[in-house]
């Protein structure tokens, strides 16, 4: 079976580790591709799209390490992807309520299937997020 990809925009190392641990629980050859900056994701995601079954986006991104490059935000990625034909479900996983709704609106108006998850208490990735991922992957109706 050919590997299937989940694309993730996230800046937190702790969350990234939780996403990777959670995806390992899925019963298929899943790969995860993670970006820390919106402009980099926009520039690099295209080759991964044919095997992509799910995209998960954060909004607020903080520069990593001593790098002073603007990491952009998830809304930039949402606007970019929303210009494309719907490809797969998208999970928006940000605590920024205003931007979460703006990202959701971009995808919905473009016909993409979109789910919202508000990051919560410790373990939300291993519970809420992975549960939603399983549901979306087990019911793969197009966006």
Image (tube, rainbow, N blue to C red):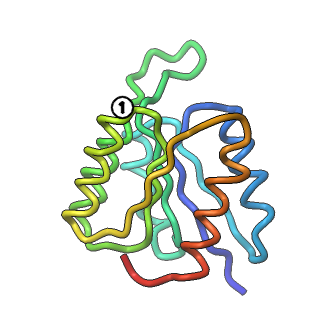
| x and y, in percent, of residue 64 in the image | 56, 22
Q: State the residue at coordinates (51%, 17%).
A: 67
Q: State the residue at coordinates (78%, 51%).
A: 21
| x and y, in percent, of residue 115 in the image | 43, 60
| x and y, in percent, of residue 140 in the image | 51, 82
- Count of labels shown? 1
Q: State the residue at coordinates (50%, 42%).
A: 118
Residue with the mark numbered 1: 72
Q: State the residue at coordinates (34%, 47%).
A: 77
The front one of 71 and 98 is: 98
Image quadrant in which you'd find residue 25: bottom right
Q: Is residue 135 left or right of residue 95?
A: right
Residue 99 in the image: above or below residue 21: above
Q: Secondary structure at mark 1?
A: loop
The front one of 72 and 109 is: 109
Q: Is residue 130 left or right of residue 27?
A: left
Q: Is residue 24 left or right of residue 30?
A: right
| x and y, in percent, of residue 105 in the image | 24, 54
Residue 46 in the image: above or below residue 39: below
Quarter of the image containing the C terminus? bottom left
Image quadrant in which you'd find residue 73: top left
Image quadrant in which you'd find residue 3: bottom right
């Amino acid at each position: 079976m050919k590997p299937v990809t989940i694309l993730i925009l996230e800046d937190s190392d702790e969350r990234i580790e939780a996403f990777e641990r959670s995806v390992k629980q899925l019963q298929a050859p899943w790969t995860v591709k993670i970006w820390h900056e919106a402009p980099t994701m926009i520039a690099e995601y295209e080759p991964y799209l044919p095997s992509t079954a799910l995209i998960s986006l954060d909004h607020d991104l903080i520069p990593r390490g001593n790098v002073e490059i603007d990491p952009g935000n998830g809304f930039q990625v949402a606007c970019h992807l929303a210009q494309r034909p719907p490809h797969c479900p998208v999970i928006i996983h940000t605590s920024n309520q205003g931007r979460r709704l703006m990202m959701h609106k971009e995808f919905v108006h473009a016909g993409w299937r979109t789910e919202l998850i508000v990051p919560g208490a410790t373990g939300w990735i291993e519970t809420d997020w992975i549960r939603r991922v399983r549901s979306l992957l087990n019911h793969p109706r197009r966006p």
